[in-house]
Amino acid sequence: MDAMRMPVLFIGHGSPMNAIADNTWSRAFARLAAELPTPKAILAVSAHWFVDGVQTTGDHRPETIHDFGGFPQALFDMRYPAPGSPELARQVVDLLGAERASVSLDWGLDHGTWSVLHWLRPQADLPVVQLSLDRRLAPGEHVALGRALAPLRDEGVLILASGNVTHNLRDAMARARQPEPETPPWAASFDADVAAALVQRDADWLAAALETEAGRHSHPSPDHYLPVLYAAAAADGVDAVTFPVAGFDLGSLSMRAALYAP
């Protein structure tokens, strides 16, 4: 297929409210849109499809999933009506191997995907397929899956990984009650160490990072960290690495984005 080689993007999506709020993060997402070429399709790896098994969304018209509670009605009213791509879903399964991946019709686009694409591609005119995170796998196995997806870049597919470099919601919610939440040392150090490892292409460190003390504080559950591994693994040494978004929301929630561009 004759197509431009696409970048790989990891983005810290943060609160679902970033989809409707005018704030530091939503404005950063909108600016980031101008840095991205137009792909033929998007493969999204979202922290919020964390299940047993590797699955791809196979619907022609994936549902907009509101996988949260306690937010304003305006957020539940949002829709991201992008088409799906059963063809891309099957291609992903072929790349990963039918023995470990399958197509599913039981999911759609959750807020890890649509709250970001609302700003990156507001037209909702490109096919979008989601890939689940298999919670049974070790981090190194997720790295291997990410590497297997890399050929999609040469076929015009943008790989979008969405999570957060640090994601301790209990800590963040406690800090939200403070007038000016401070960033704790464990969050600052883990965010900086992940950024350095992304630049150095240190997949071994990234795969073991959750075992560090700062990693355990940053991720009581691994779901928001694992998308980082897919982005890093789908990149290669030719890519330039930039961080178009950085900083912390609610004190300890890293909003870092990492863009690998050829």
Image (spheres, rainbow, N blue to C red):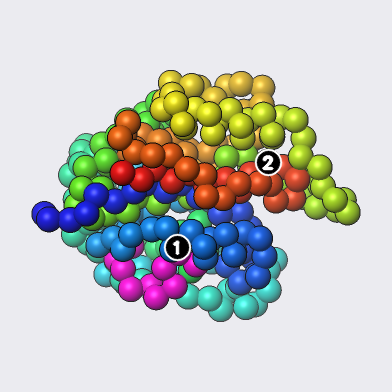
Say whether disc 1 or disc 2 marks the residue closer to the N-terminus: 1
Residue on which disc 2 sits: 168
Residue at image coords 88%, 54%: 179
The three-letter amino acid code for the residue at tag 2 is Asn
Residue lying at the far left in this picture: please name it: 1
Classify mark 1: residues with Cα within 10 Å, few (<14), some (14-19) or many (20+): some
Residue at image coords 39%, 75%: 123
Q: CA distance from mark 1 to mark 2?
A: 27 Å
Apparent side of residue 5 relative to residue 175 in the rendered image (left or right): left
Q: Which residues are magenta?
A: 119-131
The three-letter amino acid code for the residue at tag 1 is Ala
Residue 193: x %, y % from top left: 58, 28
Q: Nearer the viewer, residue 120 or 145?
A: 120
**Residue 90 makes an appearance in the image:** no
Apparent side of residue 188 relative to residue 80 in the rendered image (left or right): right
Apparent side of residue 180 relative to residue 218 in the rendered image (left or right): right
Residue 209 location, quadrant: top right
Residue on which disc 1 sits: 33
Residue 53 location, quadrant: top left
In the rendered image, residue 148 lying in the magenta stretch gets the answer no
SS state under label 2: loop
